């Protein structure tokens, strides 16, 4: 029994030794096969930028609607027209309203006559009451009739003012100077007024094209790097040669919501962002696609290496490089990174000028479970 046990242990030790030997041989073979190439850190100016796509929209844009019901009698503008504040845009047929106003004025005249008669009767009853020719009930009824007639006159006057106000609204004027973007109104069209909770018909859209902005979304990872007033470079998809400048004017305090939940893109929450466009010129139109570049960091004469030689452990967020040694494979060293552009990254600590850094990760530092080391990408 003991002999069998010793034999089993001997076989196990032999197998373990063989496995170790094969692994070591494989590692040595891998090391011998790898030809390490190195880069030398250098000082350079770095500019870290964030690129977003957005849409050009006017800062001030208004859907022109009628406040009253009616039939359009005239449309005085076309799409593309430039208008001034107070310019007449659309007229509604006011014939029915004028007839109602005439009727209301006659009603007021009649109500005034009833007030006069009720006042005379009340005055007469008051005089008779002082002589005790009428009782208190009759005097009270005369006073009530006078008050009712006065109230009816006030109601008729209020109704007339409403009708006169509606008559003014049959002429729709431009609320501010701008450009007519679109026109849906046509003469003879019957429209519903935007009042009493009703949405109403959109007759045309007016916008101030002198003030434009880019509306975009920024993910939750990058939003903390943006602040109000940051300068922005703007380019346009349809006008490649045109460049403009701008500034961040609005950052939403919360993620955009869609259907009651925060909107996400690729699993990241999106925050609405607005950028005022400066000096874009007349060629830029609402609806165009714009690309904005926002500088989020800058380093002057910083010690930098290529982004591809810096690795990251996503479990600990530590960054490291492999430094060349006089003999053998390069040695892993932790570094602190800073500003990075699309090609280079600043090394703030952990590396000195003259030290060489490997482009390859040595086989001895192969990733273990939980170590998801990978090259850190620049923005």
Image: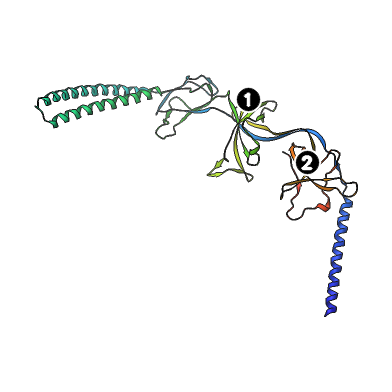
Read off the residue under disc 2.
349
Depicted 100 relative to depicted 353: above or below: above
Task: Tell me whether the residue at label 2 lies in contact with that at label 1, contact meaning CB atoms closer than 8 angstroms.
Answer: no
Q: Residue at position x 64%, y 27% from top?
A: 246
Of label 2 and label 1, which has the lower sequence position? 1
Q: Nearer the viewer, residue 76 or 364?
A: 364
Q: Secondary structure at mark 2?
A: strand
Q: Quadrant of the N terminus?
A: bottom right
Question: Residue 211: where, in percent of width, then height?
Answer: 58, 25
Other-residue count near label 1 (Cα within 10 Å), few / some / many at <14 / 14–19 / ≥20: some
Q: Position of residue 103 (x, y in %)?
A: 29, 23
The residue sitting at the bottom extreme is 1
- In percent of the image, x 83 and y 74: which residue is there? 8
**Helix or strand or loop: what does disc 1 sit on?**
strand
Along the line of sight, which residue is nearer the eye, 310 or 168? 310
Q: Write the residue at 26% across / 28% down.
A: 151
Q: Residues within 10 Å of mark 2 (few under 14, many from 20)?
A: few
Question: Mark number for residue 278?
Answer: 1
Q: Nearer the viewer, mark 2 or mark 1?
A: 2
Q: How many marks?
A: 2
184 left or right of 271 in image? left
How was this image coloured? rainbow
- Identify the image quadrant of residue 169: top left
> Is residue 98 left or right of 273 when viewed as pictured?
left
Q: Quadrant of the C terminus?
A: top right
The answer to which quarter of the image holds residue 57 is top right
Q: Position of residue 311 (x, y in %)?
A: 77, 46
C-alpha gap between disc 2 and disc 1: 40 Å
């Amino acid at each position: 029994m003991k002999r069998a046990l010793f034999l089993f242990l001997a076989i196990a030790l032999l197998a373990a030794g063989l496995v170790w030997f094969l692994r070591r041989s494989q590692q040595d073979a891998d090391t011998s096969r790898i030809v390490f190439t190195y880069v030398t850190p250098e000082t350079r100016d770095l500019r870290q930028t964030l690129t977003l796509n957005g849409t050009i929209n006017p800062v001030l844009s208004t859907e022109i609607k009628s406040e009253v019901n009616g039939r359009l009698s005239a449309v005085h503008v076309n799409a593309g027209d430039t208008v001034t504040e107070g310019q007449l845009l659309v007229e509604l047929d006011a014939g029915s309203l004028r007839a109602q106003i005439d009727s209301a004025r006659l009603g007021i005249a009649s109500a005034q006559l009833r007030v006069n008669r009720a006042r005379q009767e009340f005055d007469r009853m008051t005089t008779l009451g002082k002589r005790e020719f009428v009782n208190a009930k009759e005097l009270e009824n005369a006073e009530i009739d006078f008050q009712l007639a006065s109230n009816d006159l006030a109601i008729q006057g209020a109704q007339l003012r409403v009708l006169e106000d509606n008559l003014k609204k049959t002429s729709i004027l431009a609320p501010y100077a701008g450009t007519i973007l679109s026109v849906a109104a046509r003469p003879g069209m019957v429209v519903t007024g935007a009042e009493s909770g009703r949405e109403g018909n959109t007759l045309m859209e007016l916008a101030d094209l002198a003030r434009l902005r880019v509306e975009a979304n920024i993910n939750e990872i990058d939003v903390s790097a943006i602040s109000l007033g940051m300068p922005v470079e703007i380019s346009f998809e349809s006008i490649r040669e045109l460049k403009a400048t701008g500034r961040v004017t609005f950052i939403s305090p919360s993620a955009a919501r869609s259907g009651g939940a925060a909107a996400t893109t690729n699993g990241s929450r999106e925050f609405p962002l607005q950028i005022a466009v400066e000096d874009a010129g007349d060629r830029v139109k609402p609806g165009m696609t714009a690309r904005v570049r926002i500088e989020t960091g800058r380093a002057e004469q910083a010690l930098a290496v290529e982004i591809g030689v810096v690795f990251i452990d996503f479990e600990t967020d530590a960054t490291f490089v492999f430094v060349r040694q006089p003999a053998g494979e390069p040695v892993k060293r932790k570094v602190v990174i800073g500003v990075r552009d699309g090609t280079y990254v600043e090394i703030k600590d952990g590396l000195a000028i003259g030290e060489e850094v490997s482009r390859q990760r040595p086989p001895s530092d192969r990733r273990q479970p939980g170590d998801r080391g990978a090259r850190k990408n620049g923005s």
